[in-house]
Image (cartoon, grey):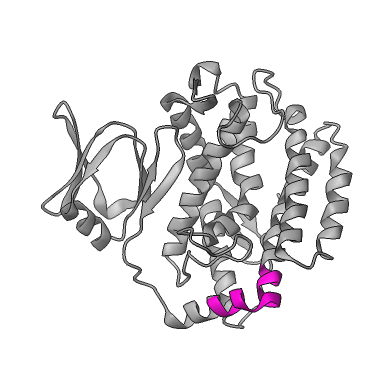
Amino acid sequence: MSENIYIFSNGELKRKQNTIYFEVKDGNHKYLPVENIREIHLFGEVILNKDALEFLSQKEIILHFYNYYGYYVGSFYPREHYNSGYILLKQVEHYLDFEKRRYLALKFVEGAISNIITVLSYYRRKGINLESLDKINALYQNLFYQNTIEEIMAIEGKVREIYYSEFNKIIENKEFIMDKRSKKPPENQINALISFGNSLLYSYILSEIYKTHLDPRIGYLHATNFRRFTLNLDIAEIFKPIIVDRVIFYITNKNMLSSRDFEEKLNGIYLKESGRKIFISKIEEKLRTTVFYKKLGKNVSYRRLIRMELYKLEKHLIGDEKYYPLISEW
């Protein structure tokens, strides 16, 4: 089974004959099982040469880079091997035709809000008083009357604002307080967790897009402009509540993190390496977790659900089957 490699140390990633190894500054090194690697996430200061990049490209391994604060900054995206001129044309067609673009943007937000409602409903059933659920349901009904992409995004923004305001009721550990969503910089520990989790999810989805015929540069909810990739941001909206947010609730309520796992830099709060490792171990666990998918009549992992979402989009683009987003029933 393929796995992800996370490198936190500073050093050099090299090719040696038909494998890759990582050498740290003191001379210690470790060989990486290149045939079993899906993607490599670089958090440390890592030097690469052309030979290593060519070999990683040949093995179809994507490199994801993060800055000192753990923010995703970019990817080495090997030459696409599944690229399809036909799918690319269809992607562009659905972007330039406003009604077709609006349909997809609407569906991505429909999936996002539905999954937020699923998460909140779970905690309401556990006895937490989440009165905002009714407000979110009202906004959800209103979503389908929005005519522009900006109006659709505005509804999503209002829903998330209300959703985040309920985090303090769900998170039992009072060391973690959510006042409002702040990104650059995150102003408290919960915002640091949300930003880090979302960064990881964007990179995971980008890796899954690489295994399809889709071009990650063309999104529908997020405008296709001078940004490198946008389709992964669209798909991430659907999965944030059921993957990232659930991991945050789990690790905070289980007291797996404390203030010692965070640091204050440049007027912001960021996860330290110790905190990142805990978060990554739990989000990897979540991606491997299987759930019963009624349509297939069998259990599938969260990572597989992401790939299936992309296949559904492909089918929609070529006119085989209308796209409807994943709405979690668990």
Quadrant in the rendering for residue 325? bottom right
Quick check: 121 above or below 222? above
Q: Identify which residue is drawn at 65% across, 18% down.
A: 175
Numbered marks: total: 0
Can residue 1 be seen in the rendering of this structure? no
Residue at image coords 56%, 36%: 184
Q: Position of residue 307 (x, y in %)?
A: 52, 62
Residue 207 shown left or right of residue 57 in the figure: right
Name which quarter of the figure residue 32 lies in: top left
Q: Is residue 200 visible?
A: yes
Please provide percent x and percent y for residue 322.
67, 76
Image coords of residue 121 (percent x, y): 80, 43
Between 132 and 38, which is closer to the camera in this rendering? 132
State the residue at coordinates (35%, 68%): 80
Q: Is residue 74 above or below residue 217?
A: above
Compared with residue 260, is residue 319 higher up or lower down, i.e. above or below? below
Left or right: 236, with 122 as reference point: left
Per the rendered image, the range of residues in magenta is 92-104
Q: Is residue 73 magenta?
A: no
Please state the horizontal and vertical placement of residue 119, each as a whole percent of the image. Answer: 73, 43
Q: Is residue 66 above or below residue 149?
A: above
Q: Residue furthest left?
A: 17
* Magenta stretch, main secondary structure class: helix
Q: Is residue 94 magenta?
A: yes
